[in-house]
Amino acid sequence: MPRIDGPGPDNGVPGQEGDPFAGLVQNEQPAKKPRPGRKALLAWLAAMALVTVAVTLNHQKSEQPAAKSSALPSVGAATAAPSSAPPSLAPETATVDRPWAGSPAEAWPAGAEGLKLPEATAVGVFDQDRVAKDLELAKAYLVATNLDPKVVAGGYPQDALDLANRETGDRMTSELSHPSEERDPANWVSRFDPDWAVPVTDQVKVQGLITFEGDGEQGLLVHADVTFVYALKPGPKVGQASPAAQPSGRGTGAQPSGSAGAKAVGFVRAEPGGVEVEREIVRRKIDFRFADPARFQVKKDKVSLVSWSSERANTLCTFGGGYLRPAFRADRGAASASPGAGPTSDPYDWSKPLNSDGKCGTASRS
């Protein structure tokens, strides 16, 4: 069964300002045949007309997009928090051609289109233009940590580090260099070790909400509550090694100086037939603070994280290797893949608070 991994012990801890926290071929001429009689000619013409209609209909049918797994219409980016979970759907097996089959995410926007920003207004010491810029910075951070195809496929999230204020950036760099269960980069960045999980599409389905408010003299707070859905196939080590094994280092670790730095692993398209496809659903809640550079030791056009928490469904529990680790069939007999003591939850229901007890629970659907 899919599992939910709640916020780690290092998540959701408030910090002070500045703290840790995108050719023609010529036809052959047929030999002349005797001219058919009138009846035979009419019959032949009628038969050819039927053949022509059949070929046209089949051709048109082949050009139609694959049917969706539900009657739900496509939805746009959210403009308000939902009041209930998405409706239940008939279960379907995800495939390379239809990775979202049977999932509410099939109707969701893909990528940054799912991150709609609210209309900016002046707040405190910040005018409307400054608030608009800070909202764009928060969105850029979400893209850099959850939607960048190279990062999702195992690459180093350098763009996210470049967006961060020094304290936040130092904390992120430290976690990337020395990941652990307590200080796991997977709490704030979505990436998959290519030895264990490979994206089958460069699309990520997205639904969530971004809001903002004043923070008194400390400036502006931006709140993000966003769910990201990824579709993946097993990497070469699944079934060949213990799922508790630590990452191999392909596209991982700290970014050393010079050309020997970790390389981003490019998106790999899966072969179409007979491939297991699993979805990992990641909900992230992040509070950003944008303080007045004239009063605080922060840089303009940089982000600081005040608090952050995440909930991950269909993931291996107690893995702190710095990557998201989907639970594939070959892993599910392992102790680390067994259901935990946490509650059963719907990973697509972001009308409810995140599970905050830190226990690994069970997802009601994937």
Image (spheres, rainbow, N blue to C red):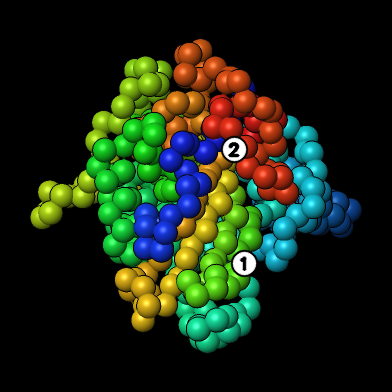
Residue at (39%, 31%) from the top-left corner?
181
Q: Quadrant of the C terminus?
A: top right
Q: Badge 2 local density, few (<14 within 10 Å), some, or many (20+)? A: some
The answer to whether residue 297 is left or right of residue 343 is left
Residue identifier under label 2: 356
In the picture shown, does residue 256 fall above or below 242? below
Q: Is residue 79 above or below residue 46?
A: below
The disc at residue 165 is none
Residue drawn at the location 12% of the way across and 54% of the way down: 257
Amino acid type for the residue under numbered disc 2 = Ser
Which quadrant: the N terminus? top right
User: Residue tagged by mark 1?
Assistant: 211
Between 176 and 276, the one lying in front of the other is 176
Residue 342 in view (yes/no): yes
Residue at (73, 49) in percent of width and height = 351
> Residue drawn 63% across and 78% down?
119
Residue type (three-letter) at the residue carrying disc 1: Thr
Q: Give the x, y percent position of residue 219.
A: 49, 74
Give the residue furthest to the right: 39
Q: Nearer the viewer, mark 2 or mark 1?
A: 2
Q: Taking 51 as reference, is 159 left or right?
A: left
Classify 10 Å Cα crowding around label 1: few (below 14), some (14-19), many (20 and above). Answer: some
Q: Earlier in the sequence, mark 2 or mark 1?
A: 1
Label 1 sits on a secondary structure element that is strand
- Disc 2 versus disc 1: distance between alpha carbons? 21 Å
Secondary structure under tag 2 reads loop
**Residue 33: percent from the left, percent from the top?**
67, 52
Comparing 39 with 185, the one in front is: 185
Does residue 26 show up?
no
Residue 263 x, y percent position in the rendering: 23, 48
Q: Quadrant of residue 282?
A: top right
